[in-house]
Image (cartoon, rainbow, N blue to C red):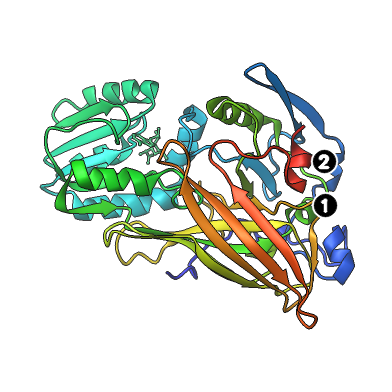
Amino acid sequence: MDDSHGVGVLGAQDARPVGGDLGPGELACSQPMGRFRNLRGHVRQSAWKTLHVGGLQVQVRTFGEPPDPGAVYLCPSVGEYPIYDDDIYQVILEDERRNTLFRSAITAAAPGATVLEIGSGPDLLWTLAAVGAGASRVYAIEVIEDSARRAEQTARSHPSDDIRVIAGDATSVVLPERADVCIAEIVGCIGGSEGIVAVLADARSRHLAPSASVIPSAVRTLAGAICLLDLFGGDVAMPPAFTPYAEAVFQQVGMPFDLRLYVGGVDATALMSTTGVIEDLRFNEQSYVQGGDLRLEITRCGRVDGLLAWIELAVAPGDAGLNSLVEDTNWLPVYVPFTLDEPIDVNVGDVLSLQVAVANADDGIHPEYFFRGQLTRTGSGAEVTVSAESRYSGGAFRSTVVHRGLLR
Ligand SMILES: C[S@@+](CC[C@H](N)C(=O)[O-])C[C@H]1O[C@@H](n2cnc3c(N)ncnc32)[C@H](O)[C@@H]1O
């Protein structure tokens, strides 16, 4: 997929003067970090906010409100949990880059078809696009009860269209017929993290005609090494507006854990290494590659404390692909921290070799990502053991340098 059309998250005016306000990794090698606003000053004025998780209290470190446009910021990964609120739906609805791609794919596929939309949300955006394009009937499934109720109201305001809203999880509801086209905007910030592989496997077996086409067509997730701590000038915190989502994720899972984190305001200049693919999902070919070997060569001297993962999404077959590291879109890159006490010093030519394993969480739907391997020093061949995980539900708490800085 080609990402050359990307518009970039940060403009040239965000460029930081080389040599000014350097982070620890930069001092070590006198290398510029890229175009990031250094948030060190803000984080010094941080405050701890208390979250309630069952009988437990967890504190999350916060700064700044709202996130400064152009600044690097952290946000809990929310898309894989049934905790969507109006603000989250609004962010998605306003993503015109995404919307243009989906509208165009639906206009091409829907005429005359029986359509299934999995995860319609309250606004039935793609269901209405499908009937508008000439679909004969649309089944819209939505798992969040309140969103499904509102979707029913939305459908009632289009009485001449054959729209049937079904409240429930797509993997457990029963449809009266099989659909010719499936629209499933349950693409995660790590492509498969919202469970699209398991949900579509079930849909293929129970809800869809054998030759049914799927929108989106494909999503790849790539990864490269970064030092998040250095992007933040040594301390991490999140805007207070996002802390209710951290609480909602912990409550959903039933305990505090090292939750998955989005990184906003970051772009490819943050990368410390070459990049590789960790997941390659092709929904129409029914080819799902999750995990495998990841080999990243360090391209800048400094430090690394984890991986940044992002998606390339083809909504229709042959799309150039939306790139969430390059473009301004609701999908944000995801930080996958190494389980280490401190960032690792790296030099150009060092190699990170990681085996990536993907296994579904206990619900059998949402994948969790595990990385094991080593950093091999160029020249000496000395090795540093490296591991990381990005869990959906549970696992370690405060096991990474970033999670220890963020949570207590
Ligand atoms: C990213 S939102 C997309 C909303 C809307 N389709 C759009 O594109 O603007 C994903 C929606 O899918 C729902 N969802 C996720 N997994 C689902 C499942 N297995 N069955 C039904 N709904 C699901 C979520 O509750 C959420 O409302």
Position of the C terminus, as image quadrant, is: top right
Q: Position of residue 100 (x, y in %)?
A: 36, 52
Residue behind mark 2:
43
Residue behind mark 1:
233
Q: Position of residue 311 (x, y in %)?
A: 49, 57
Q: Position of residue 218 (x, y in %)?
A: 36, 59
Q: Residue furthest bottom?
A: 379
Question: As displayed, is residue 374 above or below residue 69?
Answer: below
Residue for point 85% across, 58% down: 23
**Disc 1 residue lies near ligand 1 with CB under 8 A:** no
Q: Position of residue 77 (x, y in %)?
A: 56, 41
Q: Could you tell me if the residues under marks 2 and 1 are in contact, i.e. CB atoms within 8 Å?
A: yes
Residue for point 67% across, 43% down: 74
The amino acid beneath tag 1 is Gly
Residue for point 25% across, 34% down: 140
| Pointer 2 local density, CA inside 10 Å: few below 14, some 14–19, many at least 20 | many
